[in-house]
Amino acid sequence: MIPQDFLKAIATEHGVSDTEYQVLSQSIEGVSATLIAKNLGTRPEVIRNRMGEVYKKFHIPGAGPGKLAKLQQILVSAYQAHQSDQSRNFSSLHYAPSTVIESDGGAPPPRIDWNEAPDVSIFYGRTSELAELEELIVNQGSRLVGLLGMAGIGKTALSVKLAKQIQEPFEYTIWRSLRHAPSLKDLLGNLIQFFAHSSRTYLPDNANDRISLLIEFLSKHRCLLILDNAETILRSGELAGKYREGYEGYGELFRRIGESQHQSCLVITSQEKPEEIALLEGETLPVRSLQVTGLSAEEAQEIFKSKGLADPDQWDKLVEIYQGNPLELKIAATTIQELFKGKVAEFLKHSTLILNRIRVLLEQQFERLSDLEKEIMYWLAIERKSVSLEQLQTNLWLPVSQTELFDVLESLGRRSLIENIVEGDNTLFTLQMVVMEYVTEQLIEQVRAEILEAIKTQKIDHLELVRSHAFFKSPAVESGIKLFQLRPLLDIIKDRLLVVFRSENKVEEQLNKIVALLPAKSPLEVGYAPENLQHLVSTLKKAEVSASAK
């Protein structure tokens, strides 16, 4: 019986991923692919594919049942050698890092490990971004680079394409995803074992010692590391860049790689900018970041051509709506092809921006926000135009200091969710069109739910957004939003309530009961609620008059 800790260590040495290890650990115990699939909630063919990758990484060729026996033999032999080494006290953790990474008598050949990196054989545009990144990493020797941008913007594909384009000067190139949030200790073990290219490498237990070991190797050899999806190790519900509990060590890793002298580069992709990059980056410093933006209209044409879309004169409008976001463009193009036989003009008639898969992307980002960040996002959606910091501060129901507001806007910027527009001496803030539509939709649905709860309970305790946001304001739609002139929020909320009560009179009656509860409350308690509800009642009366006139 091979102990699990040793099995995990030797699997890591050979570049076996966490998902592959789940299959390996059960397979060598004789568990069938069908039962493993059931245990892991997947299909048997997936299990067989993962074991196929394990065999490749242990250099076991051919096919047939003999491969598993060969793998078991390799593992048993390695464990016996490990026990022999232990008897000679080789496993002591009190060693200098230089005794771990030993020269094999000659320069090691270039080694590349793409792990589960996506295929980028089909890749659109990004010529200027690739050139800028190559200059930063290869020519200027940047030690830490962040590729930042919202979900679907193409950070992952760009990181893989970049690595393939600039890998030649590097002795080692390794790409790893943090999607499943591996512990820092496990990640460092995986990287060190890969770089050491040794059948047995003994690692310290302490994460800081492992960081030192990694940096020593980055100093001796020129290495390119890519860590994808770094937002998974960052905390939700707070300002951007804070680490999840138990993952704070990643910040130390990023800081030390950015500050230490070495000849390698770590590239991080993330929806949020980690604090270490924000603090250490600079135009003349070895820590830099690149904000990944959407594709140009010319670059996006390749997506539309591959999807067989018609109406090329309308393609620029799609790019404008989705701000060139490659994933959102692919989702929209797929819907246009499947529902409208590729006719873009027909799709645009329906003024539907937020398709379901796009909604899922935005929902994942929105749910990561702190309460104050959500409050600011709602206000930007209500305003529907670029507004100043002073206007935002005036809008807020509960007072917020200018410092707090600075922090929130900086955090939303690091999450790539707001845009800054400079007009003269003023900096204004707004939302991208698709983000604005999503936040507006969230606002309307929550207001509807709050009003229904207040009607049901005859209490105003749940009127959170109704109190904190003035959705009765008449927004001035900017000229930049050319395609979708949305109806006033009150009209949409009214229609949502009518779906429940079926009658303007009934809705008005229920709202008046809530309005009657408000005078007994202090202004701080009711906030914007009186004006919101009174304007909503007025909207209902106008609808009644309009209906009777017909």
Image (cartoon, rainbow, N blue to C red):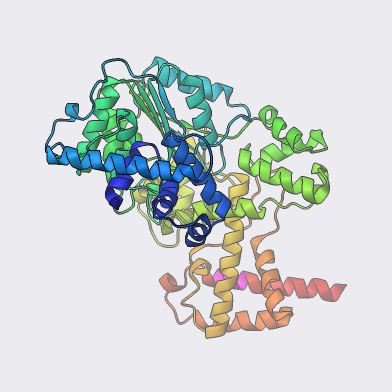
| Residue at 46 percent of width and 77 percent of height | 461
Residue under the point 70% across and 35% down:
303
What's the residue at 67%, 42% (across, down)?
330
* Residue 315 image position (x, y, % from top left): 75, 36
Left or right: 6, with 142 as reference point: left
Snapshot quadrant of residue 260? top left
The picture places residue 538, in percent across and down from the top left corner, at: 67, 72
The quadrant in which the C terminus is found is bottom right
Tell me where the magenta segment starts and ends, as one range: 530-535
Question: Could you say which is closer to the camera, residue 138 or residue 300?
Answer: 138
Q: Overall secondary structure of the magenta stretch? A: helix
| Figure disc tally | 0
Residue 523 highlighted magenta (yes or no): no
Q: Picture coordinates of residue 495 (x, y %)?
A: 71, 69
**In this rendering, does residue 430 appear at all?**
yes
In x, y percent, where is residue 530? 54, 72
Residue 348 in sight here: no
Q: Quadrant of residue 545?
A: bottom right
Give the vertical position of 215 relative to 171 (above or below): below
- Outermost right residue: 550
Q: In this picture, is 279 found above or below 141?
A: below
Give 200 or 300, whichever is nearer the viewer.
200
526 left or right of 77?
right
